[in-house]
């Protein structure tokens, strides 16, 4: 799927655009039986106390204490492609012009970042999806490269980008700033032709596999054991 998605060097959101919604939380499964666990990314707000003086070093300092744990609109995702393959993602929910979007990027703690030498050779990119919540599901629609390429070929957009040549395919990487990306989203991501397809798919809650401008996924609640839990349930065999 990653070879088909619109990707950007910079995030699609600003801090002021972020929002938090509990509908994102939980364990989910998609149509390919891949499992998604989505948890809130939390932080502790610092509470500053009174100024105090260190009598030994004669230094004045302000004492601080961890405050209430808060959610900041970002989520931690563990994506299980199968029992032996998982990916860690950081996801940000944000809103532009009343439309909800999700920005996906690799978690910095992913395996490819644990080695300094390897991490130096990786630059994370961001992908963009529309999101809608239903009573029993999450609907996601990623904007695809074919849609972006069509805009380029029709000379409808002039946005900073680079063509990254690969052995199997060439990839368009947006290099524009977040300001420019948001102008692009507001103008083109909801143009009648694109938004009509997305709204039709969201209304049906499924696709016939013929989506023209992106990739659609429907996540349903998952109540079974996670792969790590399955592994713990398997009793080791002992030969006498």
Image (spheres, grey):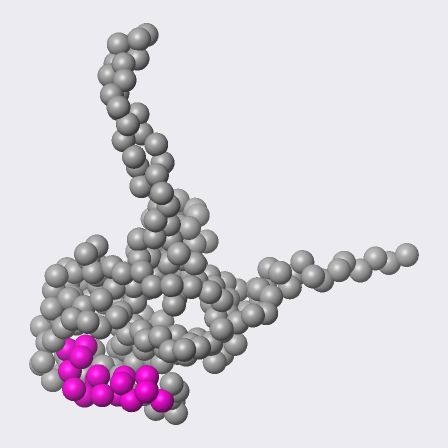
**Range of magenta residues:** 188-204
Residue positioned 42% across, 64% down in the render: 25
Asked where in the image residue 75 lies, by quadrant, the reply is bottom left
Q: Residue 99, how many percent across, how many down?
A: 22, 73
**Which is the main secondary structure of the residues drawn in magenta?**
helix
Horizontal side of residue 194 vs 179, given as left or right = right
Q: Residue at x 59, y 69 (%)?
A: 224
Query: Is 195 in the magenta?
Result: yes
Q: Is residue 102 visible?
A: yes
> Does 227 sit left or right of 21 as displayed?
right
Residue at (11, 84) in percent of width and height: 154
- The percent coordinates of residue 7 (x first, y second) are 26, 68
Q: Is residue 112 above or below residue 54?
A: below
Quarter that holds the N terminus: bottom left
Nearest the viewer among 177 and 73 is: 73
Note whether 126 is above or below 157 in the view shown.
above
Q: Is residue 181 magenta?
A: no
Q: Residue furthest right?
A: 240
Question: Is residue 170 shown to the viewer in this render?
Answer: no
Q: Residue at x 90, y 56 (%)?
A: 240
């Amino acid at each position: 799927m990653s070879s088909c998605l619109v990707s950007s060097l910079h995030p699609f959101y600003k801090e002021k655009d972020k929002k938090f919604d509990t509908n994102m939380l939980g364990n989910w499964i998609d149509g390919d039986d891949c499992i998604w666990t989505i948890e809130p990314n939390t932080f502790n707000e610092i509470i500053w106390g009174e100024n105090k003086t260190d009598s030994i070093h004669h230094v004045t300092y302000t004492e601080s204490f961890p405050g209430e744990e808060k959610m900041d609109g970002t989520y931690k995702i563990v994506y299980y492609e199968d029992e032996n393959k998982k990916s860690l993602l950081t996801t940000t929910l944000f809103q532009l012009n009343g439309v909800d979007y999700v920005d996906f990027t690799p978690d910095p703690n992913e395996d490819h970042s644990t080695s300094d030498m390897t991490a130096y050779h990786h630059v994370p990119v961001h992908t963009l999806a529309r999101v809608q919540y239903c009573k029993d599901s999450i609907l996601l629609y990623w904007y695809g490269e074919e849609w972006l390429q069509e805009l380029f070929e029709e000379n409808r957009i002039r946005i900073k980008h680079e063509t990254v040549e690969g052995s199997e395919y060439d990839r368009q990487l947006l290099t524009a700033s977040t300001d420019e990306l948001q102008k692009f989203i507001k103008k083109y991501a909801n143009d009648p032709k694109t938004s009509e397809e997305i709204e039709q798919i969201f209304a049906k809650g499924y696709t016939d596999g013929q989506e023209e401008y992106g990739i659609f996924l429907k996540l349903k609640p998952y109540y079974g054991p996670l792969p790590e839990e399955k592994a713990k349930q398997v009793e080791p065999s002992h030969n006498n």
